Amino acid sequence: MSGHLARAADECELCHAPGGELLWEDALCRVIAVADDDYPGFCRVILNRHAAEMSDLDAGEQQALMRVVLAVEGALRQLYRPDKINLASFGNVVPHLHWHVIPRWKDDRHFPQPIWGTPQRTGGGVRPAVSRRQLAGELAQRLGAPQRRGTAG
């Protein structure tokens, strides 16, 4: 790891903390649940090493990471039945590669704006009651059994 990258990793919150409640993990990445009552099912897919951009990964890692992002999208669509899924990878505030996977409903607080925008209304409608355990189980079905970092399957 170069000196600049090592310093960035030393200061990176996603290198030192899970970033939320862990739902699934393998050697490459982890899926965490974001605690946001307005957006049930909101997940992040976080790379397990420090890198800032998708182009920092080799082609196999890019494909594997996107496979996880799409599996999370599929699980959320099946369990939560949202009107739309938003996928976003910014890294402007935390320059550690991670994807936001956000179920959206036409009556949510911000729709059709991004969830970081100006609210369009208060509250939202009734959402499916899905437990984190159910979501973790659906991810395991789509991706295989989770593996902790540093373990072989």
Image (cartoon, rainbow, N blue to C red):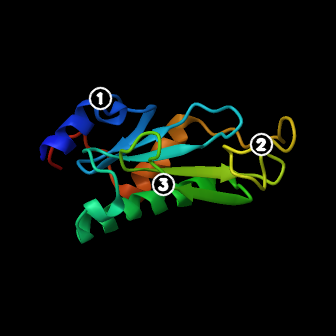
Q: Secondary structure at mark 1?
A: helix
Mark seen at residue 16: 1
Write the residue at 71% across / 36% down. Answer: 38
Q: Nearer the viewer, residue 42 or 95?
A: 95
3 and 2 marks in contact (CB < 8 Å): no
Mark 2, residue position: 118
Residues at marks 2 and 1, CA–CA distance in whole angstroms: 31 Å
Location of mark 3 (residue): 89
Local secondary structure at mark 3: loop
Q: Amino acid at mark 1?
A: His
Q: Which numbered dot is residue 150?
A: none
Relative side of 63 to 149, left or right: right
- Judge left or right: residue 39 versus residue 57: right
Query: Is there any visible trace of residue 114 in the rendered image?
Result: yes
Rendered position, 116 above or below 101: above
Query: Sequence-wise, which precedes: disc 3 or disc 2?
Result: 3
- Residue 54's quadrant in the figure? bottom left
Residue type highlighted by circle 3: Ser
